Structure formats: C-alpha cells, structure tokens
Image: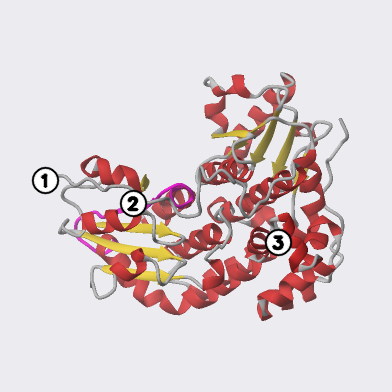
C-alpha cells in the first residue's frame, strides 16, 4: 500500500489572509479556498454548471463554508447570553436538581451526543441525549417525573414529523421548558414555539440551512450554538474558542483536502469510526455521512475504543477503513493508543485515518493518513467534535465523487430524502 501519512503541505495562503477571509464574507472565504489549489480548490473553482452536472454544487459549498459560518454563529449568538442564562436558570437555578435533555433524530440526535458530556460537566446537572422517537414512544423512561427539565431540540428544517410532535407532546409536562435550535425560521418547529413563554428559539443564519440531502454545516453550527450553553457567562471567551476552531477547520480544508481525497479513493468496502466521550457522537455522525453519501454502498459503524474489543472488532477486516478521532486528554488517549496498537499488531483494517495532535509514529502503519493541525492539541475534547465531523464529511464527499455518484442527491431511488416524509403520530390517551 502507498503510504498516505503526511501532516499537510504548508498553507499556500498566509494565515493573516485566512483570518481576514473568515471575518469578512463567506464568498471571500470560498474564493480563497478555490484559489488555494488542490482537489477541493479545483472542485470549487469549476463553473456552477459543471458543479450542478456532477451533482456537488450544494454539498461542497456547505462543507467548505463551515469555518466562516462558525465565526458568524458565535458572533450572532454571543449577544443572547443573558437570554440563554435565563433559559438555563430553570434547571440550574432551582433548589431541586434540574435535568437537561438533548433531542433530535438522526444527525440532530448525534449533535446532542457530541454535547452531553461537556454540558453535564460544565453545568453540574445531568445531561442526556435522547432520540426524538424515544420521547414519542417512551417519554416516562427518559424524562424525570419530579424535577425541572429543559429539553433542547435540534432540527435542520424543523419539519420532520418527530420534531413538532415531541414539542407539542411535552407542553403538558408542568416542569418542562424548551429550547429549540434550528436552521429554518419558517419550519414548523420554529413557528410552533412562537408566543409560548416556555419555549425559547434560536434560529441560525439561513446559509446553515443545507440545501443538500445530507446535513453538514447545519450539524456543526447547531453543535457550536448549543456549546454556548456551557459558556454563557463568558461570551467573549466563547467567541474566541469558536474563532480558534474556525482557524483549525480552515487548516483541515486547506492542508488536508488532498490527503483525505486520496484516502477516500483507496480500496475499502466498509468504514469504522472510533471516538470517546462526546467524540463518540462525532463517530456516529461521520459514519452516517459516509453511509448517506454512498447510498449504503459503503457500510459503516461507529464504536468507542474500549467497546470495539467486545465483539465489533470482528468486523474490522482487510476491507475496512478505520477512522480514529484521538483525544487530547492524556488518560483517554492512552486507552485509545492501546487499542490502535492492538489493531496494528493484529493487522486489522485496510488503512487508518488518525485525527489528532502529535500522533505517535508507532500508531501509524503504511498507507495511513494523519490529520493534524498546529494548535489542535490545545483544544478541549468537548470543543473538537466539529473538526472530527468536518473530516468525516470530506471523506464521504470524496468517496461519493470517486465512485461517480452525486453528493447532492446520492439516493436517486428515493429511499432517503432531505426531510423525512410524513407519518402518523400516535398519542396515548
């Protein structure tokens, strides 16, 4: 196998120019990426008619725009710190311990999984990600009976059947309040909460309301918006964190696009994604992107590092790509490194993509790709999921294009759609 390991070519664009583009306009940022060369640059530089013909016009733009939109989301949300502190006071300021539920379906659920560990640690209250469907069918099994509860609902469009049904179904719960985070101000979820003092709504900029089938910029921006719940006491610090993440995201795009394209074209039949803590949510979302953008032709599964040994390791065969999101926490990284060394010792997997800072050379085998960026090691694990997912999105995009499929609409047979089609909502009497 050809050795794919590299830490990215030096930025062709001066860091100051990158910083200016991320602060001015999304078009400036995308022009910078297009002019930087490489495979991503060439795709972006193609005429819109060519991008439409090849079926990637929306997906590529929505992936590439993310560093800019992250800065914009933080800038727009910071002035609402007081409002969000008041929303949180329902569960953090009561004499009774409160409870935080993060809910959504599919990618929107995985957003909650990326966030729950960090929010629980920061807020000092239980935080749990629960699928919207579970709140429809088994609400008593997931919601506290005698404690204040804040339900945070994530939705790109806000038009899926579960989204509105969960909000409506829980309105009758006396001690339950709601925070809706969505990308569509005209969606049913955003509209239905208007005028209800128990429902607060955050609508992100319209450019995050992905037009492609798969969720990309909507996912990462909703994650960063909800991450603010841990930092409402320090809006400038929140903006600084997000700005640092945007700079790292820019490095992933500008330095590692070609490496990720080569990894995506390599020979593999399935893909395994590994993450710990909130980064298991990253693994779930990255696995879904590959599954969706290849219309199920590349089978995927996410797992934790310690969980892989308990049966799922049997699926890591010679045709499996293994994507490893490596922790910045010393103890967590030690467990993860042990597992990667075991995979190497047993010669499992076709090749690996390792995402993390200062990856030890003994974790890297011939054919592997290391995705690192200066400064990544100083970012907390609770902030990193958006970078993990960006890597997963690029891998899926390049795999889709390499096999001749159309990223904007990979499911030509209509098995999946941008918004889940309507289905009956059954209520308990």
Locate residue 82, reporting x and y percent. 37, 77
In this figure, which residue is indicated by the disc labeled 3?
52
Crowding near the residue tagged with mark 1, few <14, some 14–19, many ≥20 C-alpha atoms within 10 Å: few
The residue under the point 81% across, 67% down is 45
Answer with left or right where residue 292 lies relative to residue 352: left
Magenta segment, which residues? 92-109
Q: Quadrant of residue 306?
A: top right
- Where 237 sits versus 401, above or below? below
Q: Quadrant of the C terminus?
A: top left
Q: Quadrant of the N terminus?
A: top right
In this figure, which residue is indicated by the disc labeled 2?
162
Answer with left or right where residue 336 lies relative to residue 192: right
- Where 138 sits versus 124, above or below? above
Locate residue 133, reporting x and y percent. 33, 44
In this figure, which residue is indicated by the disc labeled 1?
429
Tell me which colouring the rendered structure shows: secondary structure
Crowding near the residue tagged with mark 2, few <14, some 14–19, many ≥20 C-alpha atoms within 10 Å: many
Q: Nearer the viewer, residue 13 or 104?
A: 104
Q: Earlier in the sequence, mark 3 or mark 1?
A: 3
Q: CA distance from mark 3 to mark 2?
A: 32 Å
Q: Which dot, 3 or 1, sits closer to the camera?
A: 3
């Amino acid at each position: 196998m050809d050795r794919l390991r590299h830490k990215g070519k030096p930025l062709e664009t001066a860091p100051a120019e990158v910083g200016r583009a991320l602060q001015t306009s999304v078009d400036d940022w995308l022009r910078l990426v297009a002019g930087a060369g490489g495979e991503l640059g060439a795709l972006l530089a193609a005429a819109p008619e060519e991008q439409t013909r090849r079926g990637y016009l929306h997906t590529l733009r929505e992936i590439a725009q993310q560093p800019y939109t992250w800065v914009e989301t933080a800038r727009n949300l910071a002035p609402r710190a007081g409002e969000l502190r008041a929303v949180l006071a329902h569960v953090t300021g009561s004499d009774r311990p409160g409870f935080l539920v993060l809910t959504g379906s599919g990618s929107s659920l995985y957003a909650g999984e990326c966030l729950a560990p960090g929010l629980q640690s920061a807020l000092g209250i239980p935080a749990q990600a629960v699928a919207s469907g579970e709140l429809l069918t088994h609400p008593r099994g997931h919601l506290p009976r005698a404690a204040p509860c804040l339900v945070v609902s994530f939705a790109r469009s806000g038009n899926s059947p579960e989204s509105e049904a969960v909000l409506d179904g829980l309105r009758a719960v006396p001690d339950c309040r709601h925070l809706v985070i969505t990308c569509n101000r005209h969606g049913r979820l955003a509209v239905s909460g208007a005028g209800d003092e128990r429902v607060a709504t955050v609508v992100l900029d319209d450019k995050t309301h992905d037009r492609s089938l798969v969720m990309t910029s909507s996912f990462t921006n909703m994650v960063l918006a909800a991450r603010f719940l841990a930092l409402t006491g320090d809006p400038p610090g929140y903006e600084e964190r997000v700005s640092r993440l945007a700079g790292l995201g820019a490095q992933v795009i500008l330095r590692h696009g070609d490496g990720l394209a080569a990894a995506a074209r390599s020979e593999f039949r399935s893909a395994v994604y590994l993450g710990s803590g909130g980064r298991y949510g990253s693994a779930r979302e990255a696995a879904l992107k590959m599954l969706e953008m290849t219309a199920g032709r590349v089978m995927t599964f996410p797992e934790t590092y310690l969980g892989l040994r308990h049966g799922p390791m049997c699926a890591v065969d010679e045709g499996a790509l293994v994507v490893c999101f490596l922790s910045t926490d010393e103890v967590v990284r030690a467990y993860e490194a042990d597992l990667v060394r075991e995979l190497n010792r047993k010669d499992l997997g076709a090749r690996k993509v390792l995402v993390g800072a200062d990856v030890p050379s003994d974790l890297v085998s011939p054919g592997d790709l290391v995705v690192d960026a200066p400064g990544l090691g100083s970012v907390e694990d609770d902030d990193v999921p958006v970078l993990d997912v960006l890597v997963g999105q690029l891998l899926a995009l390049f795999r889709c294009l390499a096999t001749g499929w159309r990223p904007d609409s990979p499911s030509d047979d209509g098995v999946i759609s941008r918004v889940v089609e309507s289905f009956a909502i059954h209520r308990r009497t």
